[in-house]
Image: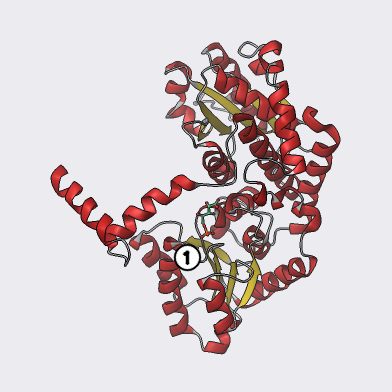
Amino acid sequence: MKLKLNLDYIENFVSPSDLASFDDRLNAAYTALLDGSGKGNDFIGWRDLLINYDKDEFARIKLAAEKIKKNSEVLLVIGIGGSYLGARAAIEFLKSPFYNNMKKDTPDVYFLGCSISSDELYEVMQLCEGRDVSVNVISKSGTTTEPAIAFRIIRGMMEKKYSKDELKERIFITTDKCRGTLKSFADREGYETFVVPDDDGGRFSVLTAVGLLPIAVCGIDIDKIMLGAQNARANYLEKGTESDACKYAAVRNALYQSGKKIELLCSYESAFRYMTEWWKQLYGESEGKDGLGIFPASVVFTTDLHSMGQYIQDGERTLFETVVMQNGAKNIVNVPYDEENLDGLNFIAEMPVTEVNKKAFLGTLLAHNDGGVPNIVIEYETRDEETFGEMVYFFEFACGISAYILDVNPFNQPGVEAYKKNMFALLGKPGYEELGKELRSRIENIK
Ligand code: PA5
């Protein structure tokens, strides 16, 4: 396996008997996920999708990606939450956070519809001026407000640029197989569609067309991603509750029970930043319900040691860290020797920067442990497709198990509706009149 779980740095915080006390719940959670008897069991398609996926659609994804690469300088990906985070994470992790600025023969990729920012929309449209553009709209429900607004605006831009026939070569819709506004619209206009499987929630959908089309457009090998995830699945089935994914799920619950309410996902690579965003949605939306759940937060070190390091070392002791450490690099850079040594750095002259980073990681690990912060460590060698696929499956599988240990439904998100209802009422959406009145009067009274 590409990922190695190291639990040495939690030993002072969780005893073997603390962990053993989770055995029954872990066994029950594993059985529930495997035999499909747990809460939300109509959304566990992701569990076996790597084997059962639609091979014809997979081939169409590759063809569409080739077409976009040939005819476009820019791909706009319109989606929110699980409909964009996985693709963005993959592109930054496997290519670079500077992907759009790099010399390359693949299109720039901009993500829209993941906010309601006027400036963002305007700025991206400016970036499209004079350039050939394709659009991939991704929404399982087909009705989410943020991407719907962005698509309406971008459609206007595209209709000015291209004829109806040209748009059929440039607009790709990823949505429900037969339901929803977006599907009807795509069928009416003759746009190519891809499917978000019925039994997959958005945050578990990166290894479907949702993530794979934008990822493939960037020249990333999606077969290797699937292979990494398949390897992980085979390993977790073979090892049962002894797998690293199950151990991670059990340990984080043991830490939670001991009062560690916040999990910081830490990396020492800026390319990992969007992986942490994807992970926060996965765990936050899956576990944060019924008044329960570890709060998922994230940092990128050493950057954030200079902003959040103080709190982590000395603040309220309710934190634990899960450090995802990359040991190698795609490209090795050394610290050069300098005759004058004015900066005093010759003691690390000729040392690879990866080695400096590793020492920062080890030093931080010990310091945070001394400060009362348990550390789960996950190590990998370098940023490649198989590692990405394995990591996605590791966190998804562990998430399902962990939420079942906590006894919550990992696959729904009822709490997300509250803001939407209020927003619709304040915007005057038909059907929300009474709530609109009530909210406006509350706002007046606060003023
Ligand atoms: O995990 C989820 O299901 C959500 O985060 C969705 O991905 C997000 O709300 C976007 O929904 P949709 O794809 O229906 O537009």
Q: Reply above or below: 231 against 120.
A: above
Which residue is disc 1 drawn over? 143
Residue 377 lies, in percent from the top left, at: 66, 26
Q: Answer yes or no: disc 1 within 8 Å of ligand 1.
A: yes
Q: Is residue 338 left or right of residue 397?
A: left
Residue 311 lies, in percent from the top left, at: 43, 22
Q: Quadrant of the C terminus?
A: top left
Q: Quadrant of the N terminus?
A: top right
Question: Looking at the image, which is closer to me, 153 or 251?
Answer: 251
Q: Is residue 384 left or right of residue 441?
A: right
Q: Reply above or below: 424 against 363.
A: below
Q: Is residue 350 visible?
A: no
Q: Residue at x 59, y 80 (%)?
A: 187
| Count of residue discs | 1
Q: Quadrant of residue 301?
A: top right
Q: Quadrant of residue 346?
A: top right
Q: Quadrant of residue 153?
A: bottom left
Q: Residue at x 45, y 45 (%)?
A: 415
Amino acid on which disc 1 is placed: Thr
Q: Residue at x 73, y 50 (%)?
A: 385
Q: Is residue 324 visible?
A: yes
Secondary element type, mark 1: loop
Question: Looking at the image, which is closer to me, 42 or 324?
Answer: 42
Question: Looking at the image, which is closer to me, 169 or 270?
Answer: 169
Residue 319 lies, in percent from the top left, at: 50, 22
